[in-house]
Amino acid sequence: MDSSKKVIEATSPTSRFNFLPSLNFRGGAKNEKEGNQETPSISQTSASDDEKKIPSTIDPDQNLREKDESKSSTIPKEGEEKGSSENENSVENLLAADPSIWSGENKEAFSDLSHPGYSVKSDPLTHVGGWLAHRAALQSVDGIDPPCWIKEEVENSITQYDYMTMPLRRAPKILVLYGSLRLTSFSRKLAFEFARLLELLGCDVRTYNPRGLPVRDPELEKELKVQELRALTQWSDGHVWVSPEMHGTITGTFKNQIDWIPLNTGSVRPTQGKTCLVAQANGGSQSFNAINALRLLSRWMRMPCCTNQSSVPKAWQEFDDAGRMKESNYRDRVVDCAEEFAKFTALMAPVSEELTDRFSERKEKNKEGRLLTQAEKEKKKTAEESKKG
C-alpha cells in the first residue's frame, strides 16, 4: 500500500459505494470476509454488456431487485431508453404496488440498496430517482474508462475510515442538494464532484434532482417530488449543499428545496442534528455570500455545519468539457471539504440524538405526548386565550 495513503483502520463499506474498481481499502474493494455484497462498478460495466443492462431508469423488477437473490446489482447506463416494458414498470405502477416507495413511509424499503431511486437517470415524467446521476461521467464507453482525477490523484492519499469499527457501524448516509436546473450548471457539476469523493470515502450518497419540485405551497405536500425530498432528508445523516450565487445570495431553486423541509412534523424534526457541508459556485470573482447564507440556513435548520467550506470563482474556467474539475487549489479544497465532512458525519451521527435532547422538548413531550407543530401551538394558545376572555 502507498505509504502516503492515510488509512484509519482502513475502510470496508459495501461495494455499492466502491465506484472505483481499484480502491485499496484494507481487505480490498471486494471484502468477502466482511460479508460485503459485490456490485460491479460503473467502469466495470461497459455499454456493450447487454446482459447487464437495466432497460428502465426505475425498474426494480430485474437487476436492482436481484440483490436479495444474488447479492449483486448493476446501475443503468447513461442514455439508455426504456424498453417495451415501460408501461408495466412506470412510476405510477410502482406507486400502485407500494405507495410508500418514494414517500419513505416504509423506512426499511426506502433505505434498502435495491431501491429503484439508485439510478443514473431520473424518471423522465416525474423526475424522481436518479440518485446516482453523479456516476454518469464515470461510465465506460466501448470498454474504455474515462479519465478520473479522483481515481488517479486522490485515491491513494485521502484519509479513509472503517465505519464498521466506529460507533456508527455503517456507511454515513449523505444527501447532496444543488441549486440550479440547468443540466450544464456549475453548481451541479461541483455537487457531483462532492458526491464522487464521498463515495470514495465509503459513504452512501444520494443526489436529489430539484427538477419537478413545485414552488412551496402547503396544498402540494402530497406531490411526489416533495415526498421524495422529505424522505431523503429523514433517511440521511448529513447534507451537502451547493448553490450558485445569484444577486448576492443563494438561488430560489435551492431555497425552495429547504423551504419544503419542515422544521418539525409532529414529534419529528427532519434535520435536527444532521450534519451539513456548504459550497458555492461563482460565475465571477470569488465570493462567500452564498455559503454564508447556507450557513445561516443550516443553523436555522438545527444542523451542525462542517467548519470547512468551498467557494469556486469563475467556475466556467474550473471545469472541463466532461464536467470534471481541473487541477487547482480550488479542487484541492473540495477534496479537503469532502474528507473532513465524511469524518465529521461519521462522528456526529451516532450522538446526534443525545446532542439534540433538549429540556424544553422533553417538557413538551411529557405534557402533550409529542412535539406540537407551530400551527397546533397557535391554535392551542388561541383557545386558551378565548377561555380567559
Image: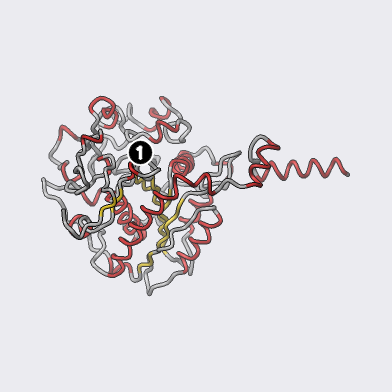
Residue 347 visible within the image: yes
Residue 270 is situated, as x and y percent measured from the top left of the image, at 52, 44
Residue 92 found in image quarter:
top left
Residue 76 is situated, as x and y percent measured from the top left of the image, at 24, 39
The residue carrying pointer 1 sits among few (fewer than 14), some (14 to 19) or many (20 or more) residues within 10 Å by Cα, namely many
Q: Viewed as shown, does residue 89 lie left or right of 104?
A: left
Q: Viewed as shown, does residue 174 lie left or right of 263?
A: left
Residue 10 is situated, as x and y percent measured from the top left of the image, at 26, 48
Q: Viewed as shown, does residue 300 lie left or right of 337?
A: right
Q: Secondary structure at mark 1?
A: loop
| Furthest residue in direction bottom, as rendered | 285
Determine whether 64 is above or below 388 in the image.
Answer: above
Which one is nearer the viewer's eye here, 111 or 257? 111
Q: Give the amino acid at mark 1.
A: Gly
Q: Name the residue: 44% across, 50% down.
A: 348
Q: Name the residue: 20% across, 48% down.
A: 23
Determine whether 46 is above or below 68 in the image.
Answer: below
Q: Name the residue: 29% across, 28% down.
A: 65
Name the image colouring: secondary structure
Q: Name the residue: 45% across, 66% down.
A: 246
| Furthest residue in direction right, as rendered | 389
Q: Tell me the residue that label 1 is attached to.
A: 117
Location of the C terminus by quadrant is top right
Residue 134 visible within the image: no
How many marks are shown on the rendered structure?
1
Determine whether 148 is above or below 56 in the image.
Answer: below
Residue 205 is situated, as x and y percent measured from the top left of the image, at 34, 46
